[in-house]
Image: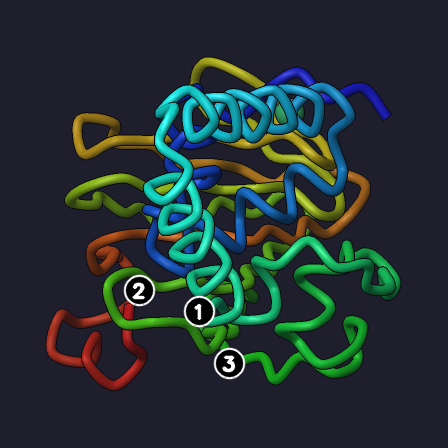
Amino acid sequence: MTIRHHLSDQLLIGYAAGQLPEAFSLVVATHVSLCDECRARLASYDTLGGALIEDQGDVEMAEAALEAVMARIEGMPQATQRAPMRASGIFPAPLADYVGGDLSAVKWRSIGMGVKQAILPTGRDASARLLYIPAGVAVPDHGHRGMELTLVLQGAFADANDRFDRGDLEIADENLEHTPVAMAGQDCICLAATDAPLRFRKFLPRLAQPLFRI
Ligand SMILES: [Zn+2]
């Protein structure tokens, strides 16, 4: 597997510092579990964080900082801890834990044109969902406020500029009006996180959005 689209430094640092919304942490943890390169980058940020604590020179302060970090780790949802968990089918370990198993455990809801989604249980400051896009079908046209992360788990999709395969991460901001299309040959399954509701334009009346939490 050759991953060509990676995490930004901003996302890695935010994750290492425990500053990301849970939905984004899930995407970062899932990408990191698929990507040797980003795992190595994350390790270097973790080392840097440890060095900064040691550099304080004040043992009491360092201990307090360490305690705060440990408390944060213990309070984190399971998926963002780095304890070994088992992958399940196409789901890397952190995601398998959220879904509660493999693909057969996913409770899909249709959003039109054969496209399906399943909202994952995360904190409400951002939302995470699995998207199922039949081969050759476009994801319903949508804009978004804030940031949207889309990680490919199966198949591939392409937007106007690029192609994304398993493990690849697309980072989109509100300026990007994009229409990803699943490549022919295999249905595409993605993990997506947004820090604001998606605004699907074609298939769902706006009034229905609160019902679907999108
Ligand atoms: Zn990567």
In the rendered image, which residue does mark 2 sit on?
203
| In the depicted structure, whether residue 26 falls above or below residue 166 | below
In the rendered image, which residue does mark 3 sit on?
109
Task: Name the N-terminal-most of marks 1 and 2.
Answer: 1
Q: Position of residue 67 (x, y in %)?
A: 44, 57
In the rendered image, which residue does mark 1 sit on?
112
Q: Report how far apart the C-alphas of labels 3 and 1 lie in the structure.
A: 9 Å
Image quarter of residue 89: bottom right
Task: Name the N-terminal-most of marks 3 and 2.
Answer: 3
Determine crowd level at label 3: few under 14, some 14-19, many 20+ residues with C-alpha closer than 10 A.
some
Name the quadrant of the N terminus.
top right
Q: Position of residue 96 (x, y in %)?
A: 73, 68
Image quarter of residue 92: bottom right
Determine crowd level at label 2: few under 14, some 14-19, many 20+ residues with C-alpha closer than 10 A.
few
- Dot 1 and dot 2 residues touching (CB under 8 Å): yes
Looking at the rendered structure, the kind of residue marked 1 is: Gly
- Circle 1 — which element? strand
Query: Would you say 7 lies left or right of 124 here?
Result: right
For label 1, being within 8 Å of ligand 1 is answered no
Colouring convention used in this rendered image of the protein: rainbow
Image quarter of residue 101: bottom right
Q: Position of residue 208 (x, y in %)?
A: 20, 80
Give the number of marks.
3
Name the quadrant of the C terminus.
bottom left
